[in-house]
């Protein structure tokens, strides 16, 4: 397009306007990501509850600002409310660090992630109890309620203020880290935490101060949004996802990386909005639809090209390690007898349908959850890889089976097999990229791919039904009855669990555990670590797809919620609740979690706090989970019996 035509077209002004508007969004992203990055840099804890401090900051601001405005004036009340919200949030952050996180510094990374997620659930229900379920709107910013003309459009004054607030906070943090003793201690702890303690610096006090600073910045970010959006209960998770994306793109622990990543994500979204409908190769495509997944696309590209983010560095090996996991133990004679007895009991369960008609339905839900949790555990336990996107393969299996059954008209066994194939192929493709990373970078790339899959499912209405999902996914005879489908599901789950156990105790399973314990030593021993992890990823995704395909036929309909991040989190909770150290853990955890969902959690609106409390109890008191606790109790009883 000629230059004069480009300048006269409406596209360029729209791009420029959206670019300026994107800077305001970037500032909000940066404020919450900067606190998360500072906390990780010093404590090495990936705080899943960080979005909760952002949400608390906004709720406190919409409460304090009107109250202060009535007493001391509008402008002072508004800005005083923002400052007060940030300070209170910082104090709450310090309290959380002292009471909870201090107990987790030596725990494995997975336990830290799940414990802070439990804290997120508890804070969400605390906010529900204190402020109620309705959205709460705050006052407008005095003196910043107008608009400025920009390229033929009107830009709100407050958005311009926010666009400048981000760089101002960035400069302030830079001066704090470079010019003050506290900042030098933060940088020193980021470089070598153990050496800081050896030099006599009060490490506990430093960690508390850093966590308070990070929580306060997040609270400030939330409070500053008071004039732009209402306080609502969904903010914690939505902001958390964006904050993680920004921190990972910029590099864990890098403040300037967090700001540049925030600008990059915000500007890509602004670009998609400004372009609207575009033609590519004669095909029209609505670029604004990419807003649902733009940040995850950016993160996936960055992590593939730079595995530790734009400014991140490879993690240094810690001098102190958590307790080494005991080796997996195969079932003994007693364990095999117990497993056979349990299988026989489950097989006979349809006989109780006349007394308890809901029994096969509930039992099938437990079985599906157990297979999904077992597939995730295969990655987390023997593989040492915590996936935040395992729901992608569950969803691919469900949608693949649903499409084959309803659109292609295939019989139930063929449709089921096609769903498993779709999940396996997806796991092969995504796993090739993911297994090149480790730790939180691996977890976030799996989340990115899962969100990309979710976005495709949500928007490809011609194939997936879009937000409405797919209906009429009923199995053919002899699987159409409750008992028939339940027995078929039991057979699938039993085969899947046995397959995973056999693989875990095969030479491949030993190679996978060697790669988990020390990738460097495994490579030196001739084990192709990358290929082993890739194959393990594909196996886990395929088995997870079998659980998804079974879910589709059990429910008769599916929706994009089937593939959402919430299902991945449920899987993580099941594994942790049952215990990561043993192969029986995910089965026990899935049963306990599903029964809790079906009974106790339906009886109270504060079920999140209940679930969060149970998770914290498991992490702090029973770190081996339910199965680990039962195993230890059995060992104690055997030792006591042998001593008589």
Image: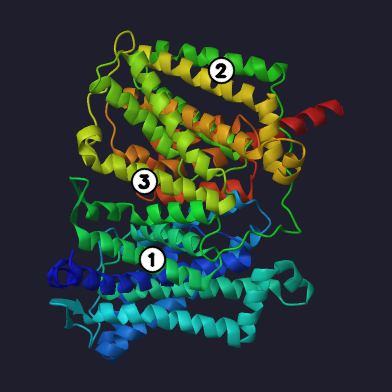
Q: Which quadrant holds the C terminus?
A: top right
Tag 3 or tag 1, which sits nearer the N-term? 1
Q: Which quadrant holds the N terminus?
A: bottom left
Q: CA distance from mark 2 to mark 3?
A: 39 Å
**For residue 338, what is the image quadrant?**
top right
Give the labeled residue for mark 2: 342
Q: Is residue 565 visible?
A: no
Q: CA distance from mark 1 to mark 3?
A: 18 Å
State the image coordinates of residue 498 (x, y, percent, origin top left): 58, 20
Tag 3 or tag 2, which sits nearer the N-term? 2
Given residues 414 and 56, the one toward you in this image is 414
SS state under label 1: helix
Q: Is residue 25 visible?
A: yes
Identify the mark at residue 452; answer none if there is no mark.
Answer: 3
Q: Is residue 467 above or below residue 219?
A: above
Q: Residues within 10 Å of mark 3 (few under 14, many from 20)?
A: many
Residue located at (22% from left, 35% from top) = 465
Q: Is residue 468 above or below residue 191?
A: above
Residue located at (55% from left, 44% from top) = 386
State the image coordinates of residue 205 (x, y, percent, origin top left): 65, 75
Tag 2 or tag 1, which sits nearer the N-term? 1
Identify the mark at residue 109; answer none if there is no mark.
Answer: none
Residue located at (34% from left, 76% from top) = 224
State the image coordinates of residue 75 (x, y, percent, origin top left): 27, 89
Can you tell which of label 1 and label 2 is closer to the viewer? 1
Give the labeled residue for mark 1: 264
């Amino acid at each position: 397009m000629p230059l004069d035509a480009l300048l006269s077209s409406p596209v360029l002004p729209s791009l420029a306007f959206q670019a300026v508007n994107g800077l305001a969004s970037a500032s909000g992203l940066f404020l919450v990501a900067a606190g998360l990055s500072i906390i990780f840099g010093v404590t090495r804890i990936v705080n899943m509850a960080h979005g909760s401090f952002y949400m608390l900051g906004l709720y406190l601001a919409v409460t304090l600002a009107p109250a202060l405005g009535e007493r001391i004036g509008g402008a002072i009340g508004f800005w005083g409310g923002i400052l007060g919200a940030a300070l209170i949030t910082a104090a709450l952050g310090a309290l959380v660090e002292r009471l909870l996180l201090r107990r987790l510094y030596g725990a494995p990374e997975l336990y830290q992630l799940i414990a802070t997620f439990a804290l997120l659930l508890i804070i969400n229900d605390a906010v529900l109890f204190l402020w109620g379920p309705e959205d709460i709107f705050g006052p407008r910013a005095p003196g910043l309620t107008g608009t400025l003309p920009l390229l033929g459009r009107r830009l709100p004054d407050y958005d311009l203020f926010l666009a400048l607030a981000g760089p101002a906070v960035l400069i302030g943090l830079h001066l704090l880290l470079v010019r003050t003793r506290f900042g030098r201690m933060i940088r020193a702890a980021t470089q070598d935490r153990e050496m800081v303690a050896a030099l006599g610096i009060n490490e506990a006090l430093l960690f508390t101060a850093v966590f308070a600073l990070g929580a306060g910045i997040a609270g400030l970010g939330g409070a500053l949004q008071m004039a732009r959006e209402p306080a609502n209960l969904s903010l914690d998770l939505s902001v958390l996802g964006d904050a993680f994306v920004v921190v990972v793109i910029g590099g864990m622990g890098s403040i300037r990386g967090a700001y540049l990543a925030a600008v990059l994500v915000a500007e890509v979204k602004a670009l998609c909005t400004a372009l609207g409908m575009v033609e590519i190769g004669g095909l029209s495509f609505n670029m604004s639809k990419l807003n649902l997944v733009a940040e995850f696309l950016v993160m996936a590209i960055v992590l593939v090209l730079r595995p530790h983010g734009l400014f991140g560095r490879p993690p240094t090996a810690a001098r102190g390690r958590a307790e080494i996991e005991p080796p997996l133990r195969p079932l003994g004679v007693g364990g095999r007898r117990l497993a056979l007895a349990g299988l026989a009991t489950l097989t006979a369960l349809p006989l109780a349908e006349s007394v308890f008609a809901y029994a096969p339905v509930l039992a099938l839900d437990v079985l599906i959850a157990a297979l999904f949790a077992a597939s995730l555990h295969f990655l987390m336990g023997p593989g040492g890889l915590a996936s935040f996107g395992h729901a992608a393969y569950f969803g691919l299996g469900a949608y693949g089976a649903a499409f084959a059954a309803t659109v292609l008209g295939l019989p139930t066994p063929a449709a089921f097999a096609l769903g498993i194939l779709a999940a396996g192929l997806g796991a092969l493709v995504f796993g090739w990229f993911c297994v090149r990373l480790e730790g939180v970078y691996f977890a976030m790339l799996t989340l990115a791919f899962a969100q990309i899959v979710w976005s495709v499912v949500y928007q490809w209405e011609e194939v997936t039904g879009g937000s409405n999902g797919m209906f009429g996914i009923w199995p053919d005879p002899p699987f159409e009855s409750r008992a028939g489908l339940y027995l078929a599901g039991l057979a699938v789950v039993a085969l899947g669990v046995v397959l995973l156990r056999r693989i875990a105790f095969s030479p491949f399973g030993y190679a996978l555990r060697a790669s988990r314990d020390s990738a460097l030593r495994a490579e030196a021993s001739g084990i192709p670590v990358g290929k082993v992890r890739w194959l393990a990823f594909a196996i886990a995704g395929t088995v997870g797809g079998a659980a998804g395909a079974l879910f589709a036929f059990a429910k008769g309909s599916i929706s994009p919620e089937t593939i959402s991040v919430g299902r991945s989190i449920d899987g993580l909770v099941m594994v942790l609740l049952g215990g990561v150290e043993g192969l029986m853990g995910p089965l026990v955890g899935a049963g306990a979690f599903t029964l809790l969902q079906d009974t106790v959690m339906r009886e109270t609106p504060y079920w999140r706090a209940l679930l969060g409390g149970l998770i914290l109890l498991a992490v702090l008191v029973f770190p081996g989970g339910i199965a680990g606790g039962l195993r230890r109790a059995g060992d104690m009883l055997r030792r006591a019996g042998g001593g008589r």
